[in-house]
Image (cartoon, rainbow, N blue to C red):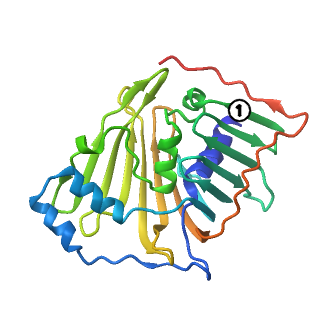
Amino acid sequence: MRIKLYTILFAGIFLSLSCVTRRNSGKPAGTQPDQNVAGLALNRDADTFWKLADSSSRRFRLISARFTATITDAEGKEQSVKGKLKACRDSVIWASLTPFGLEVARLRADQSSFGFIDFFNKKYFAGDYTYLKELAGYDLDFYSLQALVLGVHEFRGERSGLAPARSEETWMVSEKGVLRGEMRIPDKKVWFAKENLIPYRMEYSDWKTGDRVESEFKTMQVYNNNVVFPSSIAVAVKTEKKKFRASIDFRSIDFEDPETEFYFTIPEGYQPIEVKKQDK
C-alpha cells in the first residue's frame, strides 16, 4: 500500500496550481520581449535581474484550486486522481484527494511539520520533514515543496550572490544544496523565460544520491489580479527506488477569495504509520 499511497500523496503535493474560472479567468501571458529584460544581455548585475524577475513573479497570498492529474509509473501504468489544493504562501499547503468522488486522503504541510490522513485504510502520519525521505525517497523542506507546487522561486542565500547565467533561450539561476541538521537540502535550478523572466521550470537534485525532481510549468496565464500562473504542469520524479511522471490539467482557481480553512483533524481510532529514518 505504501507505494500506491505515496504516489497519490505525491500527486496531491505537486498537482494543483492554476486554471480558469469565470470570475478570475486567465489569458495567455505575453511573449513579447520586455525592453528592460533585453537590456540584461549586457548587464549581469544580480540586483537588476531580481528586481525585474520579481515584477513578473506570482503575486498572491492565498490560492485555492481543483485539479485532475494522470500519473504514469516506471512500467507505463496510468492512474488518474482528482482533488483540491489550498495554500497560504510561506505558511501552509493543504490538499484533499478524491479519485472516486469521495475523499480518500488529506495532507497538510507547514514550515515545521508534514502529515496525511489515509481515510481508506484509517491510518495517518504526522511528523517532520526528516521522515519525508522514507516516504518519498527525497529530501525536501516546506519551501522546496512550495516552490515546486506554486512556482515561487525562493532561494536560501542572498540574492546578490545568485548571479543569473544566460543562454540563447533562457536565463538560469542555480543554488548549491546544504546540510541542515539531519536534512540534506537539495541543489536547486530555476529557468526563466528570456522574454519576460517568468519562471517556467524548476529542478531539485540531491547532491549525494543524484535523485531528481523536476517541475515544468506550461501555457502561462495572466489572471485578473495580474498573477501569472501556468494552466498545466508536468512533474518528473527520478530516484533510485522510484520513477514516475505526472501530467496535470486544471479546472478552477481562486486568488481573490479562496477558502482559508486548512482542516486536519485525525479521526478517533485511526492508527499511526510508523516510518523509520533512513541513514544519511
Residue 171's place in the image compared with 35, above or below, is above
> Where residue 144 sits: x, y (%)?
47, 42
Q: Residue at x 29, y 58 (%)?
A: 51
Q: Is residue 115 left or right of residue 138?
A: right
Closest to the observer, 139 or 113: 113
What residue does disc 1 label? Answer: 126
Quadrant in the picture for residue 21? bottom right
Quadrant placement of the N terminus? top right
Q: Is residue 53 left or right of residue 186?
A: left
Instruction: State whether residue 79 appears in this view.
Output: no
Q: Residue at x 70, y 58 (%)?
A: 260
Q: Is residue 124 left or right of residue 54?
A: right
Closest to the observer, 101 or 46: 46
Residue 30's place in the image compared with 167, above or below, is below
Quadrant in the picture for residue 15? bottom right
> Where residue 69 sits: x, y (%)?
59, 60
Mark 1 burial class by Cα count in 10 Å: few <14, some 14-19, many 20+? some
Closest to the observer, 4 or 9: 9
Q: Check the image and name the residue furthest to the left.
A: 42
Say what amino acid the circle numbered 1 marks. Ala
Q: Residue at x 60, y 54 (%)?
A: 88
Q: Check the image and name the residue furthest to the top.
A: 279
Quadrant in the picture for residue 162? top left
> Where residue 161 sits: x, y (%)?
23, 40
Instruction: State whether residue 7 appears in this view.
Output: yes
